Image: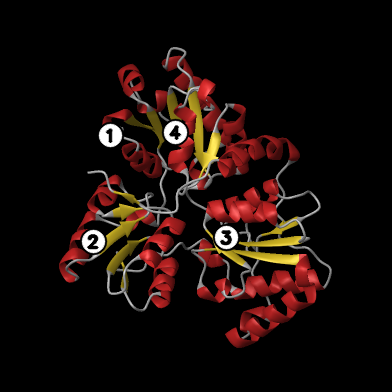
């Protein structure tokens, strides 16, 4: 993870009203030279200043479409800013307001370990083609390894489309894989495999650091999906007990969770989907309906405030906060904007050309494979 030096005065002592005024003033001076992208998990104090909001897939597409902007300020985490740099022109600067905004899941997969894993699994599989599918929550270097091995990136919104592409014959426009290596989140891939009609026995977990990832030859033969042992610390906080508690507390409530949750939680819920799919599902629900939502708390509270004619509550008994996403605050947003006004570009995220070239292939495949806008029913 990169390190961000603490901000000094005047930023650390400004009131929220003053910060808002200065952010708006700086944006007005910069005009269409700057675009601010805000991930759904950002706090409201950031979202109110965003020109566009979305999940990883939507923001990846939007970043590539901002051809008029000199500066793209990405209010998200480091891997998202890397993706934006890959998908934008070299003349455009992608800025991350706080360099310490990383992602623990992305840090769970290393490019060298992933390449060694693919070579090891290929030898175990006896020549069976293994196609890597890498969650966008990964480093640019891991995305590059994915492309070099014929794979693609995915988001939670289009994971099924990408997995189906990976296993589709090349004659039908697919990657021609017989097996998939899913990196770095095991839970998204497992839930999606069940959506596709596979069973839990078709999924095996690869544990980095163990010989052969801890897999036997028989497990490798049996597996269609080899799942890297990674996870999201936020979504792993949700439990089956919480689902039962909410159903007891609010009879008739429907439970919708993110597929990064443990498979037991996904199966206990009524629906699962990406942040965009969760938003669309709750928005389309009937007035008076009741929803328990299992994802990052800022999105849940925003949905509750937006849809006051229906009940929207957090699935967990406590706020499940993405602490690294929360590092993007109004102080840092104000600082980077005012530095741009002064002619100084700070916190620019630059992916080396050798990595960018290959990583873009994996991202372009992801962007080209559309997902669906609605959540999926849980497979029991």
The picture places residue 119, in percent across and down from the top left corner, at 51, 21
The picture places residue 281, in percent across and down from the top left corner, at 38, 61
Residue receiving disc 2:
242
Residue at the farthest top position: 126
Of marks 3 and 2, which one's residue comes earlier in the chain? 3
Q: CA distance from mark 2 to mark 4?
A: 32 Å
Q: Residues within 10 Å of mark 3 (few under 14, many from 20)?
A: many
Pick the residue in front: 11 or 284.
284
Task: Provide the secondary structure element on which disc 1 rests.
Answer: helix
Circle nearer the viewer, 3 or 4: 4
Q: CA distance from mark 3 to mark 4?
A: 28 Å
Q: Is residue 167 left or right of residue 82?
A: left
Q: Residues within 10 Å of mark 1 (few under 14, many from 20)?
A: some
Pick the residue in front: 219 or 98.
219
Q: Residues within 10 Å of mark 4 (few under 14, many from 20)?
A: some
Q: CA distance from mark 4 to mark 1?
A: 17 Å
Residue receiving disc 3:
76
Residue receiving disc 1:
200
The picture places residue 80, in percent across and down from the top left corner, at 59, 53
Circle nearer the viewer, 4 or 1: 4
Of marks 3 and 4, which one's residue comes earlier in the chain? 3
Residue receiving disc 4:
164
Q: Residues within 10 Å of mark 2 (few under 14, many from 20)?
A: some
Pick the residue in front: 268 or 20.
268
Of marks 2 and 4, which one's residue comes earlier in the chain? 4
Q: Is residue 32 visible?
A: yes
Q: Is residue 1 visible?
A: no
Residue 215 disc label: none
């Amino acid at each position: 993870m990169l390190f961000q030096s603490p901000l000094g005065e005047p930023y650390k002592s400004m009131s929220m009203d003053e910060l808002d005024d200065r952010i708006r003033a700086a944006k007005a001076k910069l005009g269409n030279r700057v675009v601010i992208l805000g991930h759904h998990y950002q706090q409201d104090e950031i979202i109110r200043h965003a020109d566009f909001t979305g999940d990883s897939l939507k923001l990846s597409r939007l970043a590539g479409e901002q051809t008029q902007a000199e500066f793209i300020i990405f209010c998200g985490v480091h891997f998202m800013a890397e993706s934006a740099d890959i998908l934008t022109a070299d003349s455009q600067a992608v800025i991350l307001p706080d360099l310490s905004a990383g992602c623990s899941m992305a840090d769970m997969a290393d490019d060298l370990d992933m390449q060694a894993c693919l070579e090891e699994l290929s030898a175990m599989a006896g020549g069976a083609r293994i196609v890597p599918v890498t969650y966008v929550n990964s480093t640019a270097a891991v995305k590059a390894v994915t492309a070099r091995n014929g794979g693609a990136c995915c988001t939670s919104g289009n994971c099924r489309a990408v997995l189906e592409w990976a296993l589709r014959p090349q004659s039908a426009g697919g990657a021609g894989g017989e097996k998939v290596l899913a990196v770095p989140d095991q839970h998204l891939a497992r839930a999606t495999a069940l959506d596709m009609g596979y069973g839990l026995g078709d999924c095996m977990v690869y544990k980095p650091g163990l010989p052969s990832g801890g897999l036997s030859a028989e497990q490798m033969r049996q597996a269609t999906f080899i799942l890297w042992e990674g996870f999201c610390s936020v979504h792993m906080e949700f439990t089956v007990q919480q689902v039962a508690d909410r159903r007891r507390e609010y009879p008739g409530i429907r439970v919708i969770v993110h597929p990064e949750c443990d498979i037991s939680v996904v199966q206990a819920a009524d629906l699962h989907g990406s942040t965009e799919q969760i938003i669309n599902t709750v928005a389309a629900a009937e007035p008076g309906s009741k929803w328990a939502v299992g994802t990052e708390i800022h999105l849940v509270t925003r949905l509750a405030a937006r849809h006051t004619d229906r009940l929207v509550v957090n699935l967990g008994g406590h706020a499940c906060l993405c602490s690294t996403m929360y590092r993007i605050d109004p102080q840092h947003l104000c600082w980077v904007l005012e530095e741009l006004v002064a002619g100084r570009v700070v916190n620019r995220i630059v992916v080396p050309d050798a990595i960018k070239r290959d990583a873009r292939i994996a991202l372009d495949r992801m962007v080209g494979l559309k997902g669906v806008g609605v959540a999926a029913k849980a497979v029991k």
